[in-house]
Image: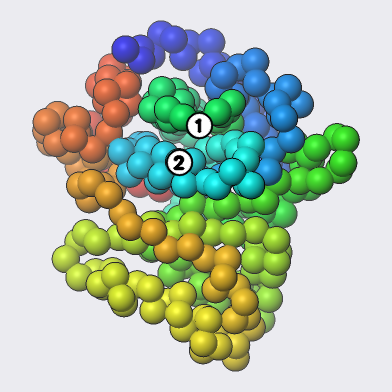
Amino acid sequence: MHSPHSLSTLIPHFRTTLQSFPSSAATFLVLHTIPHSFPPSASPPIKTLHVLDASFNPPTHAHLRIALSALSSTNHASKPQRLLLLLATQNADKAPKPAVFEQRLAMMTILARDILSQSCGVEDLAVDIGITKHPYYHDKAIVIEESKYYIDPATGEQPQQVHLLGFDSLVRLLNTKYYPPAHTFAPLSALFGRHRVRVTRRMEDGDKYGTVEEQDRVREGLKRGEREVEGGKKEWAERIEMVEGEGEAVSSTRVREGVGKADWGLVERLVGKGVREYIQEERFYSGEDEGG
């Protein structure tokens, strides 16, 4: 059982760091690692860093499945691998709610434990819990590198980042409205020049996201050069991997709605046992919806 009491020593650490982070020079920090005794310096040089960046409000089975799928699909040449669960304290589309960030970090810690317990066959895996001030993927890729947190001290090399996205996030990534003032894809060279994205197709909400073929068309259009006028490069398509989603459709909004209605049967289908217990004991989301 993941009890809130097991997180009691971490919550004050999270709260203090979150209070000082906005005014600090740092733009990316790792706050906690599971197992605790497994910093990058204590492990073999990392070749692949999976980055799961989300609002985690709350973490769901979808987050768990995306992480486990990526970890189990990594080929031998791309190992050792590591996972970073990343929370942006600023969101490109939504106003942040700092009051709940420490609670989200606590739930991310529970999620990290669940990932480790279910990642059978993944050797020497560690999961980091991190925060960043940057809402955009290309900026996140840059600040993770600039932090040198994952650098191999012997060679100076850094791991390739694989950013784990849902299809809706790919649509936002390839929308020039997020890249002022020129509104071109030039900033994405920092991401696609060296790193990759792994996109889980979304097949829920009726036809909101389209069929598999329609979702894949976003990548194929890039490959055919249809986005070149906006600065998109054909070769970037080779750095986008499209994969099938699994299991019941899950969204954090649906979880919060279930909590608001006290529909714990629904909530239990959508989140892990530890996260559900933490929500119940801390009485999250029982009133007004807390988006973001």
Secondary structure beneath dot 2 equals helix
The residue nearer to you, when weighing 85 against 16, is 85
Point out residue 143 in the picture as x, y percentages from the top left corner.
Answer: 72, 49
Q: Residue 178 lies in what quarter of the image?
A: bottom right
- Is 283 on the left-hand or right-hand side of 234? left
Check disc 1 and give the amino acid type.
Val
Vertical side of 210 occupied by 291: above or below: above
Point out residue 208 in the picture as x, y percentages from the top left corner.
Answer: 24, 69
Q: Residue at x 64, y 47 (%)?
A: 77
The residue nearer to you, when weighing 204 against 21, is 204
Instruction: Examine the rendering and report whether any part of residue 156 can be seen.
Output: yes
Point out the image quarter for the N terminus: top left
Q: Residue at x 41, y 23 (%)?
A: 117
Vertical side of 85 occupied by 222: above or below: below
Q: Residue at x 29, y 28 (%)?
A: 272
Q: Would you name the residue on which mark 2 appears?
A: 72
The residue nearer to you, when weighing 133 against 111, is 111
- State how far apart marks 1 and 2 are (Cα): 7 Å
Q: Would you name the residue on which mark 1 appears?
A: 122
Mark found first going from the N terminus, 1 or 2:
2
Instruction: Examine the rendering and report whether any part of residue 88 can be seen.
Output: no
Vertical side of 152 occupied by 165: above or below: below
